[in-house]
Image: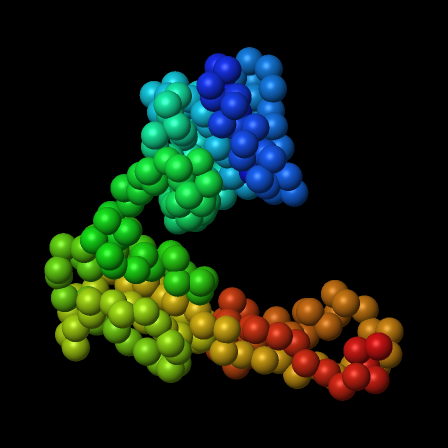
Amino acid sequence: MIGLISATAAGAAARNRLAAAWPDRTRVYDGPAGEAVRAAFAECAQVVCFLATGAVVRLIAPLLGDKTADPGVVCVDEGGRFAVSLVGGHGGGANELALEVGGLLGAEPVVTTATDAVGVAGLDTLGLPVEGDVARVSRALLDGEPVRLDAEVPWPLPALPVADQGSYVVRVTDRAVRPAAGEVLLRPPSLVVGVGASRGAPVDEVLDLVERALREAGLSARSVAALATVDAKAA
């Protein structure tokens, strides 16, 4: 759900246009802006504020926790000229939301995340679980430092400026390993776990067995794409 917040008549008009266009995706938060922002931040996956960016920064600053969990926040100015991806550009989807909002309202999307600005795919935007030193390796890619791609599992990736050698590593693996310093692990959905059990077997017991089998095989649960069984057992 996308929370919509405004404080002026002009902001409310733009807010209402968005609400009318996306009735199933949005929820309008009325009342004082501070209270509305706090409520929307707690209840919504994304927030669009028709307020000045400075005001929104002050309102959300005490609410920020983890960029992987915080909602994406987009600000639209009073004149409806810009849709600014303010917080959660990648993890919260604010970059894409700014593009959508801009297209609907005729506003210019403003996206300032470094990877988007230079056309390099963000390691946290590839659609794969990611672990490790994401910030340092991303910075190395942006700065043109040599970053090695170690694809233990063949998996399609967008073009990345990688090299044959380098002190930083992007490793594509389904093995149960920990990332080293200067290394990012990408977890492809390359594993399918076959499950056989008596009808009515407890779910917790099955999951415990799956976890144990993966652990004994040295494989990561984050690369499991599906559990498979025969139709008779799945019914």
Total numbered circles:
0
Residue 32 in the image: state x and y as whole percent.
Answer: 55, 13
- The colour scheme is rainbow
Is residue 137 among the parts visible in the rendering? no
Residue 207 in the image: state x and y as whole percent.
Answer: 69, 69
Q: Residue furthest right?
A: 200
Instruction: Identify the residue at horizontal 64%, vertical 39% (top origin).
Output: 23
Residue 181 in the image: state x and y as whole percent.
Answer: 26, 60
In the rendered image, the vertical position of residue 18 relative to residue 123, given as above or below: above
In the rendered image, the vertical position of residue 12 relative to residue 233, given as above or below: above
On screen, residue 78 versus residue 142, left or right, reads right
Instruction: Identify the residue at horizontal 39%, vertical 78% (top origin).
Output: 155
Is residue 71 among the parts visible in the rendering? yes
Q: Nearer the viewer, residue 24 or 174?
A: 24
Residue 173 in the image: state x and y as whole percent.
Answer: 40, 75
Task: Quadrant for residue 44, please give it.
Answer: top right
Work out which quarter of the rendered image holds the N terminus and state it: top right
Task: Quadrant for residue 39, please give it.
Answer: top right
Instruction: Identify the residue at horizontal 54%, vertical 69% (top origin).
Output: 221
Q: Nearer the viewer, residue 173 or 81?
A: 81
Task: Quadrant for residue 167, please give it.
Answer: bottom left
Instruction: Identify the residue at horizontal 50%, vertical 34% (top origin).
Output: 47
Work out which quarter of the rendered image holds the C terminus and state it: bottom right
Q: Nearer the viewer, residue 88 or 11?
A: 11
In the rendered image, the vertical position of residue 49 relative to residue 148, given as above or below: above
